[in-house]
């Protein structure tokens, strides 16, 4: 008989014996346990290959950006210009948020570097003499970051707005005793050097160095057709115009895009239907290299240069300068966004400052006005070079009227004085004198100044974005930037240098601008002129060739 208190207990605490339902529940419990064990064993079996598979190193992406000739004053002027045209107070440039230090720029031969020695300091992490392209004092080729990256299995690329054979891209991808040996430089770039092809993607200008001298567009001194060699021997896909660039199906590595015979246009002059912008080329290069690098799992190294920033400063042209500086900032933003998304490192700096720019100018002996006028630059629609060329190619009979009604409005001056019109008219036979006179007029109106048409020794800013930029900061020698990239990518420049013992570093100087359409057009329309009118436009070897040709 059950205890009378049992009826007061919950059912699950009563002694109900081995009731059939309870036995069934126990059996189910056993089945659940066995099933769980079986599923765990099965899952472990399928996961085993993934658990035991060795995980390789994470891909590394390194982007080196060079704002050729851009000094601290360039940023100040361009920031104020952007603030004026946008109407946005306290405008911030994309570069502003990424300042990490500054760089000293001297070369081994001078306190003032040229672009070749400056770029070689980055590419070889070593000082060299002015004019040296991937070559050290003593005349020995030095392994570059780009070459070492390719040897280590990375993809490589270069995007510039100058000729692809110009000093900066050349110093990463070629070896020449002098920067003007651009025929030799082009040969390296298509893979004719001792290392073979080191560059997987190239975007820029400079088609003339890749064409045989039988071509009107060529600036080579021989009959080598490097486009044919690049296509047939190195399997390059060739892009020669905007239509080619916009065709994504053609963006297969290796890729060579040459969008101008010589330098690409200043951004203020650029026709978007004819040439891609620096930002567009950077975006395409990043996408192409990133997608292609998935197959190797290694990553890539990309060099980007805002090349024509420097050339605008050589011309003391603040109009072309601010537009190219702002375009460079746009390209930097694109590269920074990529690095922040994928991981990697982005370093941006200049090889040197050009022009000795001062943002502010005292032009009277009275107490100074502390101001400068960005609105003067904002009203201009073309570079000084573009307008000088338009004057020299215009019919003489209507030239004075053309200068007054077309050239000065393009400079942002609707009602020029007779003195200004006459100043340009009397300089009509010399392209550089025209540029210089335009500079004097516009710089005075904007109240800015230049101290030189060349480079200066001023320290330049260093900017960074990505994984490990905290490891490079403060005031640096330019060679430290190259050494940092070498370490980040795990490269050995010395190993590559050892493979370049017999690398050719001498070549014939280019015939340069022998077929420059501008020079020919001017000389045809102005028979009273001769090559001396282009004294600074052509090298001595080029002048001799052009005299012989004409």
Image (cartoon, helix red, strand yellow):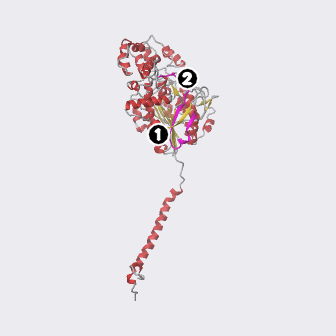
Describe the element under mark 1 as helix, strand or loop: helix
CA separation in Å, label 2 and label 1: 38 Å
Q: Is residue 81 left or right of residue 185?
A: left
* Mark 2 neighbour density, 10 Å: few (under 14) some (14–19) many (20 or more): some
Residue lying furthest front in this view? 367
Give the percent coordinates (x, y) of residue 37. Answer: 48, 67
Magenta run includes residue 463: yes
Q: Earlier in the sequence, mark 2 or mark 1?
A: 1
Quadrant (top left/top right/bottom left/bottom right) for the N terminus = bottom left
Which residue lies under the disc numbered 2? Answer: 509
Query: CB of mark 2 within 8 Å of CB of mark 1?
Result: no
Give the percent coordinates (x, y) of residue 543. Answer: 52, 17
Determine the residue positioned at 41% across, 39% down.
249
Magenta stretch in the rendered image: 449-477
Which is in the foreground here, disc 2 or disc 1?
1
Whether residue 338 is visible, yes or no, is: yes
Give the percent coordinates (x, y) of residue 370. Answer: 44, 25
Is 532 rendered above or below residue 169?
Answer: above
Which residue lies under the disc numbered 1? Answer: 336
Residue lying furthest right in this view? 138
Determine the residue positioned at 43% across, 31% down.
79
């Amino acid at each position: 008989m059950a205890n009378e208190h049992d009826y007061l207990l919950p059912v699950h605490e009563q002694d109900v014996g081995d009731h059939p339902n309870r036995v069934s529940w126990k059996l189910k419990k056993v089945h659940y346990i066995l099933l769980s064990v079986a599923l765990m064993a099965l899952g472990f079996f399928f996961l085993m290959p993934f658990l035991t598979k060795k995980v390789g190193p994470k891909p590394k992406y390194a982007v080196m950006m060079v704002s050729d000739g851009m000094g601290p004053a360039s940023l100040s002027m361009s920031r104020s210009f952007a603030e004026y045209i946008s109407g946005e107070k306290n405008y911030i440039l994309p570069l502003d948020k990424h300042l990490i230090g500054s760089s000293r720029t001297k070369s081994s031969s001078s306190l003032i570097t040229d672009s070749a020695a400056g770029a070689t300091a980055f590419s070889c992490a070593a000082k060299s003499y002015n004019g040296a392209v991937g070559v050290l004092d003593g005349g020995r080729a030095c392994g570059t970051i780009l070459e070492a990256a390719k040897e280590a299995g990375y993809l490589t690329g270069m995007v510039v707005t100058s000729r692809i054979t110009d000093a900066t891209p050349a110093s990463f991808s070629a070896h020449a005793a002098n920067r003007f040996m651009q025929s030799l430089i082009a040969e390296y770039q298509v893979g004719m050097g001792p290392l073979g092809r080191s560059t997987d993607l190239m975007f820029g200008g400079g088609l003339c160095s890749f064409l045989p001298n039988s071509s009107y567009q060529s600036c080579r001194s021989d009959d080598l057709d490097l486009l044919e060699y690049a296509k047939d021997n190195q399997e390059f896909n060739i892009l020669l115009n905007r239509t080619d660039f916009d065709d994504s199906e053609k963006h297969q590595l290796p890729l060579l895009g040459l969008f101008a015979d010589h330098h690409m246009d200043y951004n203020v002059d650029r026709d978007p239907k004819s040439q891609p912008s620096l930002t567009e080329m950077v975006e395409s290069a990043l996408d192409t290299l990133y997608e292609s690098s998935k197959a190797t799992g290694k990553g890539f190294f990309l060099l980007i240069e805002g090349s024509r920033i420097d050339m605008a400063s050589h011309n003391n042209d603040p109009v072309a300068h601010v537009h190219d500086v702002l375009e460079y900032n746009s390209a930097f933003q694109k590269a920074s966004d990529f690095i922040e998304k994928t991981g990697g490192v982005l370093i941006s700096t200049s090889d040197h400052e050009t022009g000795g720019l001062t943002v502010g100018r005292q032009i009277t002996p009275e107490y100074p006005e502390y101001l400068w006028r960005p609105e003067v630059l904002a009203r201009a629609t073309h570079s000084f070079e573009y307008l000088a060329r338009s004057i020299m190619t215009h019919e003489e009979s209507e030239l004075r009227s053309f200068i007054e009604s077309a050239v000065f409005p393009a400079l942002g001056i609707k009602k020029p004085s007779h003195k200004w019109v006459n100043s340009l008219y009397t300089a009509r036979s010399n392209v550089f004198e025209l540029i210089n006179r335009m500079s004097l007029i516009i710089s005075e109106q904007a109240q800015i100044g230049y101290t030189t048409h060349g480079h200066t020794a001023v320290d330049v800013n260093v900017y960074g974005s990505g994984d490990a930029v905290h490891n490079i900061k403060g005031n640096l020698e330019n060679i430290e930037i190259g050494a940092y990239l070498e370490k980040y990518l795990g490269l050995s420049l010395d190993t590559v240098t050892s493979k370049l013992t017999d690398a050719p570093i001498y070549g014939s100087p280019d015939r340069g601008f022998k077929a420059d359409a501008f020079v020919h057009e001017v000389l045809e329309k102005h028979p009273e002129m001769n090559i001396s009118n282009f004294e600074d436009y052509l090298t001595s070897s080029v002048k001799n060739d052009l005299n012989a040709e004409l």
